[in-house]
Each structure stands twice: as C-alpha cells, then as structure tokens.
Amino acid sequence: MSTPSIEPVAAYLTDLQDRLCAAFAASDGASEFREDSWDRPEGGGGRTRVLEGGKVFEKGGVNFSHVHGDALPPAASARRPELAGRGFQALGVSVVMHPVNPYVPTSHANVRFFLAEKEGEPPVWWFGGGFDLTPYYPFDEDCRHWHRVAHDLCQPFGDDVYAEHKRWCDEYFYLRHRDETRGIGGLFFDDLNAWGFERCFAYLRAVGDGYLEAYQPIVEKRKHTAFGQRETDFQRYRRGRYVEFNLVYDRGTLFGLQSGGRTESILMSLPAVAHWRYNHQPELASAEGRLAEYLKPREWLQTGP
C-alpha cells in the first residue's frame, strides 16, 4: 500500500471498536454497550456504543465514525488553508471511559485518518491520535506502567518518537485557564504522513492496540479498592476540569460539531455526573491535594523502576 487507502483503515478501526467494547464489557461484568448506528445528512455516519450505569464504569463510549463531504468545516480549513475546496473523508475511533471507583483513572484514546482530494491534484492525507490518562488518586506505579507501554510501542518507529509525542500530549491536554495538565499525559500526534502511508498506518495500529494494554491492567488492579463519599465528591469535582477541556479546547469536539456530526456521539465523552465548586482548594497535605503534583509534565520513565 504505497498510496493512501481508506478500506484497510476502516477495517482496522471497526475491529478495534469491537475489541475495545468486548474488553470493557468483560471488565465491567454488569453492563453491555448500547449501539446506535447513525447517518450524517452531508455524507457518512458511524456506530456509537455507550455503556452507562455499570459496575465498574459509570459511563463509557467507544465510537466509530466515517464522514465525508465536498468541503471542509472551518475548524479544519482554518489550520490548513490549502485544503479549502477539497472533498474530504475523516474516519476514526474515539474512546472515553469514566469509572465508578475514584481510584480508577478516567482514560481517553483516539485514532483517526483524514484524506482530502481534489481532481487533478495529489491527495492530502494524515493520521492522528493518541491516548492519555486522568487519575484522581494517582499511583506512581500506574503512571509508570502507562508511560512504559507508550514508550515501548513507539520504539520501533524511532528513538525520538515517544519523547516527541509525549511532549505533544503534555502540551495539548493543558488547561491554560487553570494552568494545569488534564492528567498525566501519554501520547498525542497529528498530521502524521512523513513516514509514508504503510509505516504511518502501522503506528496508528500500535497506538490503538497499545491503549488497552496500558489501561486494562490499571482498571483490574484498582477497581475493587474501597472508597467512600469523600473520594466520589472529589472525583466529580475533578471531572469538571475534564468537561472544561473538552468543551473549550478539544479539536475533535470542534470538528465534529462544525462538520455536522451527530451531537450525542460527539458529546458522549462527557461524564454522567460532574461538580463545580467555587474556588475549591484541597488541603495540600491531603490525598486530594496531592493530585496537584501530578498535573504538570513529568519524565515518568526516569523516576523509578
């Protein structure tokens, strides 16, 4: 495959959605994903799968979408003016899992492919995606595991890939108005085409497959940890920051809404319950206050075994 091809990417993404849903449903043990298939009037559609009210996951979504159209929305063409006037196809899988237990982190992953074509000109294409982790009561060993998986999947693609895409993640998932990162990071990449289609697609698959390898062991380790109302209250307070990022900064949310995507599917990333408290400041010496130490970039693989 020396030239970009939609079919193998779509086949991988739909299979990834199936595998993720099966794994999370098995971990939850009480709820299954509900599926909605939808069509977009301007072209394309998707499969939205949502789990709600589970034993392990209060709310989770694993979405596949494949949309196309004759013209790009402003959210895309503003960054890439050379794409104006091109027809486009955009497809991807997006995942957000909000756990019941505050000791289990929220996680997010996204892998996507974009193709823009115009008669008489070469196609413009790229891959993007990544995964990031948002703990409420972080454990160093979980953070190191998360970043070790990220590092190892990057290694076959170059010695500098992990450092570059980790840094990009730290910078992207940053709430400027709060002066804090959304969580402890992971990987983020966009506009990836410099390696050629085959190698870029292989990296996309490594990231998509690596997400479950990174997250599932943390879920299994922490899902039975005892907790009370104090921890739940703090979790819901911190979920408010997650909402703020998704509604203020997230490119995928803006692209989806501006391109006429299905609103329910785009906003499935929001938690079922979130709280905002006026000027809430946890005591620095408390378990809740300790989280502030984690909301800034850190070299996790240089801080212990």
Image (tube, helix red, strand yellow):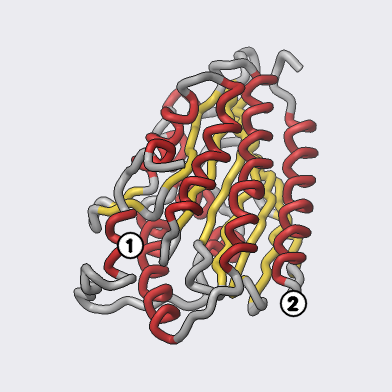
Q: Is residue 180 left or right of residue 11?
A: left
Q: Is residue 48 above or below residue 236?
A: above
Write the residue at 60% across / 28% down.
116
Q: Position of residue 270 (x, y in %)?
A: 50, 66
Write the residue at 49% across / 42% down.
147
Quarter of the image for residue 89 reads top right
Q: Is residue 156 visible?
A: yes
Quarter of the image for residue 182 reads bottom left
Q: Is residue 238 above or below residue 107?
A: below
CB under 8 Å between discs 2 and 1: no
Q: Is residue 233 left or right of residue 32?
A: left
Q: Nearer the viewer, residue 46 or 83?
A: 46
* Mark 2 lies on residue: 30
Write the residue at 54% across / 38% down.
150
Identity, as a three-letter code, of the amino acid under mark 1: Leu
* Mark 1 lies on residue: 291
Q: Nearer the viewer, residue 35 or 100?
A: 100
Write the residue at 22% across / 78% down.
278
Q: Position of residue 65 (x, y in %)?
A: 67, 49
Quadrant position of the N terminus in the picture: top right
Identity, as a three-letter code, of the amino acid under mark 2: Ala
Q: Nearer the viewer, residue 102 or 80?
A: 102
**Label 2: how many Cα within 10 Å (few below 14, some 14–19, many 20+):** few
**Secondary structure beneath label 2:** loop
Q: Is residue 261 left or right of residue 37?
A: left
Quarter of the image for residue 60 reads bottom right
Q: Is residue 88 visible?
A: no
2 or 1: tag closer to the N-terminus:
2
